[in-house]
Amino acid sequence: MALPGFINQLLLLMDSGLILSDAFRNIAEEYKRLPERDRNYFTDSIIVIAKEAERTGMGPINGFYRFAMGLNIRELTKTANYLYENKNRGTELWDSLSELAADLWEERKRLCLVKIRRSELKMSFPLAVMLISLILMTSAPALMQIT
């Protein structure tokens, strides 16, 4: 769920003139400053990837690629493959990455709509029970007077 926001942050930093690896490091630094309650698995993983990149001298994009391949999540793997293959492209990367971010936002919106529909379905049964009980409560006095 945090991947589209991460890509948008990468795009903003790259648009301001940073290269991809520096933008990744800046995002990891900002994630470090977040309070513990606002972090999630993805943000903690980005912090760990940046630390490992500093410690080993390997680029953060390579670490992100290894992280994504280990999780086997389709969207994350697609993003990591794209970043890994195009990490030296510069401005060409920005256009394609923005399209990828838009696709991820659409997928996230679609998943939210599915959850909304599912919750509507779950709530329809209690609503029907309440409706039936209201009908019985309002019609019971009238039926008692008839007899």
Image: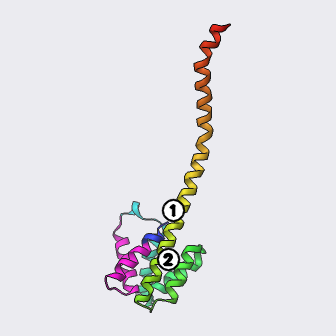
- Principal secondary structure, stretch drawn in magenta: helix
Against 120, residue 142 (above or below) is above
Question: What element does badge 2 sit on?
Answer: helix
Pointer 2 residue: 100
Marks counted in the figure total 2
Q: Is 97 displayed left or right of 135 in the figure? A: left
- Is tag 2's residue or tag 1's residue first in the polypeptide sequence? 2
- Classed neighbour count for the residue bearing mark 1: other residues with Cα under 10 Å, few (<14), some (14–19), many (≥20): few
Q: Is residue 15 magenta?
A: yes
Question: What element does badge 1 sit on?
Answer: helix
Q: Residue at x 62, y 32 (%)?
A: 129
Pointer 1 residue: 109
Q: Position of residue 67 (x, y in %)?
A: 53, 79
Against 32, residue 95 (above or below) is below
Residue 13: name its quadrant: bottom left
Against 41, residue 14 (above or below) is below
Q: Residue at x 57, y 19 (%)?
A: 138
Quadrant of the image containing the C terminus: top right
- Classed neighbour count for the residue bearing mark 2: other residues with Cα under 10 Å, few (<14), some (14–19), many (≥20): some
Taking depth in this image into account, of 84 and 38 the one nearest to the observer is: 84
In magenta, the rendered stretch is 6-34
Taking depth in this image into account, of 59 and 79 the one nearest to the observer is: 79
Mark 2 is on which residue type? Leu
Residue 15: name its quadrant: bottom left
Mark 1 is on which residue type? Lys
Could you tell me how far apart the alpha carbons at marks 2 and 1 are, in whole angstroms? Answer: 14 Å
Q: Position of residue 120 (x, y in %)?
A: 57, 46
Taking depth in this image into account, of 120 and 5 the one nearest to the observer is: 120
Q: Is residue 111 magenta?
A: no
Q: Position of residue 139 (x, y in %)?
A: 61, 18
Residue 33: name its quadrant: bottom left
